[in-house]
Amino acid sequence: MYAPEIFPLEPDCWDVEPRRDGAVLVRVHSTDRNGRRLPDAVFTFQLGDPQYSFWQEKLLNRNAEKEKSS
């Protein structure tokens, strides 16, 4: 089971983008807690990583949504 299945992420709280080397970069935005904001959490997943296909699909879906709205 993957973390996004346990803790569903709202689409507005993360960004996903491709890297030139084929990896997928995921940035989860931090929230303001008690007046303090932590840095964003940044992850990269490469082909063969357990969560790569999940985030690759999210990237493709976001790109398709952007093309529809253009």
Image (tube, rainbow, N blue to C red):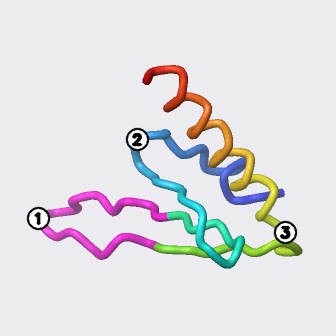
State which quadrant residue 20 falls in: bottom right
**Residue type beneath disc 2:** Asp
Helix, strand or loop at disc 2? helix
Q: Earlier in the sequence, mark 2 or mark 1?
A: 2
Would you call the spot at circle 3 few (<14 residues within 10 Å), some (14-19), or many (20 or more)?
few
Marks 3 and 1, how far apart at CA: 35 Å
Taking the magenta stretch, the answer to whether it contains residue 31 is yes
Taking the magenta stretch, the answer to whether it contains residue 59 is no
| On screen, residue 61 above or below 26 | above
Q: Position of residue 67 (x, y in %)?
A: 53, 29
Q: Of discs 2 and 1, which sits in the foreground?
A: 2
State which quadrant residue 2 falls in: bottom right
Q: Nearer the viewer, residue 47 or 39?
A: 47
Residue at image position (21%, 69%) is: 37
Farthest residue to the right: give it. Answer: 48
Residue at image position (74%, 46%) is: 57
**Residue type beneath disc 3:** Pro
> Which residue is identified by label 3?
50
Locate residue 53 relative to residue 30 in the image: left or right. Answer: right
> Which residue is identified by label 2?
12
Residue at image position (60%, 44%) is: 8
Query: Which span is picked out in magenta?
Result: 27-41
In which quadrant of the rendered image does the C terminus lie?
Answer: top left
Residue at image position (71%, 71%) is: 22
Q: Position of residue 36 (x, y in %)?
A: 16, 70
